[in-house]
Image (cartoon, rainbow, N blue to C red):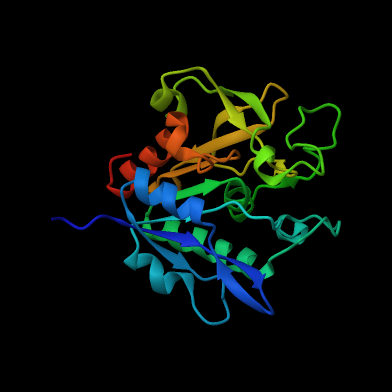
């Protein structure tokens, strides 16, 4: 039996009991392993103790997950302190991972904060008003909503004709879950829009920097992926990329 490709999944620093731990929420790893048909390894966000370029050559691709934490505004040139929680070691590791993955021409995928990570690492900016700006759709359920119910908050996205997602779905639009307080401000140079909401916010992008296949979405395809064929399609694209078929 031939070996499956190996996906690196970035971890977050989170308190577990009285200590900090490296955490990857199960639903990201399980959806990736099941529907990209791959094995997975957790990449610790401990940049003082390991370098991204030490491990990327041993991986077939990298997934940057969503997280309760936000990218520190200083990372994209904003002097405002912003709203936490923050995870500065993840910020550092994700920047190094993006650089190393692109240099190695490995696939790079992102979900929610992972989309924001990639945009910031490549020189783009974020906006922090996606749940409060009356000129936008509401991109997050109201405060106080139960955790599972947050993922019932949905809106449409328009898929860009000729794009990777439009081709994969054979559709011009999707109805997606929306659980984010921040979003794309200025899209980094070299990235192509894959999906927008009717209010104009970029909700997915792709690219091939240095020939590395890259695809990121703002929504959460890992949530209830077992029951949602549209969610599984995202991870099937990841599986193709890990096998050099994207």
* 146 shown above or below 160: below
- Where is residue 41? Give x, y as percent: 40, 65
In which quadrant of the rendered image does the N terminus lie?
bottom left
* Residue 167 screen position, x and y as percent: 40, 24
Q: Which one is nearer the viewer's eye here, 151 or 95?
A: 151
The residue furthest bottom is 49
41 displayed left or right of 199: left
**Left or right position of 217 against 170:** right
Q: State the residue in front, 6 or 60.
A: 6
* Furthest-left residue in this view: 1
Q: How many labels does the image show?
A: 0
- Quadrant in which the C terminus appears: top left
Expressed as whole percent of the image width and height from the top left, the position of residue 145 reads 77, 41
Q: Residue at the location (42% across, 36% down)?
A: 232
Whole-percent x and y of residue 49? 53, 82
Answer with the quarter of the image where residue 179 lies: top right
Residue name at image x 47 percent, y 48 percent = 109
Give the residue displayed 68% in from the left and 21% down from the top: 198
At 46% from the left and 32% from the top, the residue drawn is: 228
Compared with residue 168, is residue 241 higher up or lower down, i.e. above or below? Answer: below
Image-based side of 34 in relation to 70, left or right: left
Q: In this view of the protein, which residue sits in the foreground, 162 or 16? A: 16
């Amino acid at each position: 039996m031939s070996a499956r490709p190996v996906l690196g999944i970035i971890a977050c620093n989170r308190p577990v009991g009285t200590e900090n731990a490296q955490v990857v929420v199960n639903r990201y790893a399980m959806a990736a392993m099941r529907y990209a048909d791959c094995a997975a390894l957790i990449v610790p966000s401990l940049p003082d103790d390991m370098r991204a370029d030490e491990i990327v050559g041993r991986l077939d691709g990298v997934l940057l997950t969503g997280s309760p934490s936000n990218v520190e505004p200083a990372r994209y040139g904003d002097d405002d302190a912003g709203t936490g929680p923050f995870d500065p070691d993840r910020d550092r590791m994700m920047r190094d991972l993006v650089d190393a993955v692109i240099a190695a021409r490995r696939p790079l995928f992102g979900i929610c904060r992972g989309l924001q990570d990639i945009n910031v690492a490549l020189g783009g900016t974020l906006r922090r008003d996606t749940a409060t700006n009356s000129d936008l759709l509401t991109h997050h359920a109201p405060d106080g909503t139960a955790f599972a119910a947050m993922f019932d908050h949905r809106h449409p996205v328009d898929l860009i004709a000729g794009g990777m997602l439009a081709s994969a779905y054979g559709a011009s639009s999707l109805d997606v879950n929306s659980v984010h307080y921040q979003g794309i401000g200025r899209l980094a140079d070299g990235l192509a829009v894959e999906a927008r909401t009717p209010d104009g916010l970029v909700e997915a992008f792709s690219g091939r920097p240095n020939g590395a296949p890259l695809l990121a979405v703002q929504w959460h395809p890992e949530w209830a992926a077992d029951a949602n064929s549209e969610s599984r399609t995202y991870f099937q694209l990841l599986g193709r990329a890990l096998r050099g078929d994207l």
